[in-house]
Image (tube, grey):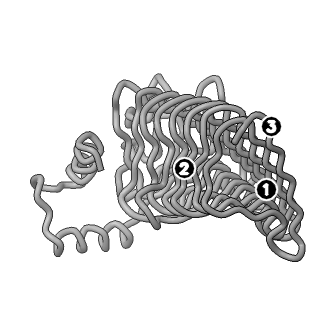
Amino acid sequence: MTASENKRFRRGWMCVGKPGPALSAVTFACLLAATSNSLAQHEWDNNGGGGNYEWTTDNNWNPNTIPTVTDETRINTACSQNNPVLINGGNTAYTYKLNIGSSGGSAGYLKLDNGYLTNSSAVASYIGNAGIGWVHLVSGDLDLKGSMYIGNAAGSSGTVLIDGGRFANEPFNNGNIYLGYSNGSVGKVYVSNGFFNSGYEIHVGEGGAGELHVQGGTVKTPRDLKIGVTAGSTGLVSLQSGSIDVEDLSVGNSGIGSCIVNTTLTCRAFSIGNQSNGVGYFELGNGR
């Protein structure tokens, strides 16, 4: 953890009443227990007179306070790609659980431009849980501990655009990042700059349709990158510029997987059509 990350982490606990920089193990355990037992929902409504689309404006939320590390944050309405919920100006936002497009028919949009979003515990977060979820990281840091689902339930759609900064669920062993988790879901990630990092594995097409397009920047996981994971799934990874660094690359694990490489992909193990139902396609153009 860098000094700046450590500073933001301490600020997160201060917002729930942490008395100082030191936190004993007993106090820390009590705080986590209190968090899980008192989880509240904060829903973006943009109808309370905030007059902008900024996360840090109290009246943009229902109830009319910004979310904290004890809150599930839901973004389902009253925003769009042209007017997304915005974290900017070097501000740090906090949540316990992020849930964008949490219900069928809902749509939520979030943008970080010199903004930071973090949570307190390793719990699952969703970008397109049952509806539409969209996140655009221009610069800053989105680091949510726990598994992340980009397109979760059947009929859902999740999209992440990374033009700079870091999108992650680190540190190590905090959970996988899934693109297209269930049959009938769609999850897509586009990286043009910055970092797309998983603390464990990245699954592109877990049970649905997943796509990872890398036009620059870095994709990294200490474990596996799996493409087309279960039967009936489809996954595509296109590496045109930038780099991908993984432990094990599996193309067509039990589903249909495709991988197109035109620059540097680093892996320590490699398989195509790993299981009996798996179908894998690998194309090496100008890459290595």
Q: Position of residue 123 (x, y in %)?
A: 48, 65
User: Which residue is disc 3 drawn over?
Assistant: 285
Residue at position x 37%, y 47% from top?
94
Q: Position of residue 151 (x, y in %)?
A: 71, 53
* Residue 105 seen anywhere in this rendered image of the structure: no
Are there few (<14), some (14-19), or many (20+) residues within 10 Å of tag 3? few
**Where 286 falls versus 276 (above or below)?**
above
Answer yes or no: do the residues labelled 1 and 3 have beta carbons within 8 Å? no
User: Which residue is disc 2 drawn over?
Assistant: 220
Whichever of labels 3 and 2 marks the residue nearer the N terminus, that label is 2
Q: What amino acid is at disc 3?
A: Gly
Q: In the image, which is nearer the foreground, mark 1 or mark 3? A: 3
Q: Which mark is residue 185?
A: 1
How many labels, in total?
Answer: 3
Are there few (<14), some (14-19), or many (20+) residues within 10 Å of tag 1? many
Whichever of labels 2 and 1 marks the residue nearer the N terminus, that label is 1
Q: In the image, which is nearer the foreground, mark 2 or mark 1? A: 2
Q: CA distance from mark 2 to mark 1?
A: 24 Å
Residue at position x 17%, y 75% from top?
26
Q: What amino acid is at disc 2?
A: Lys
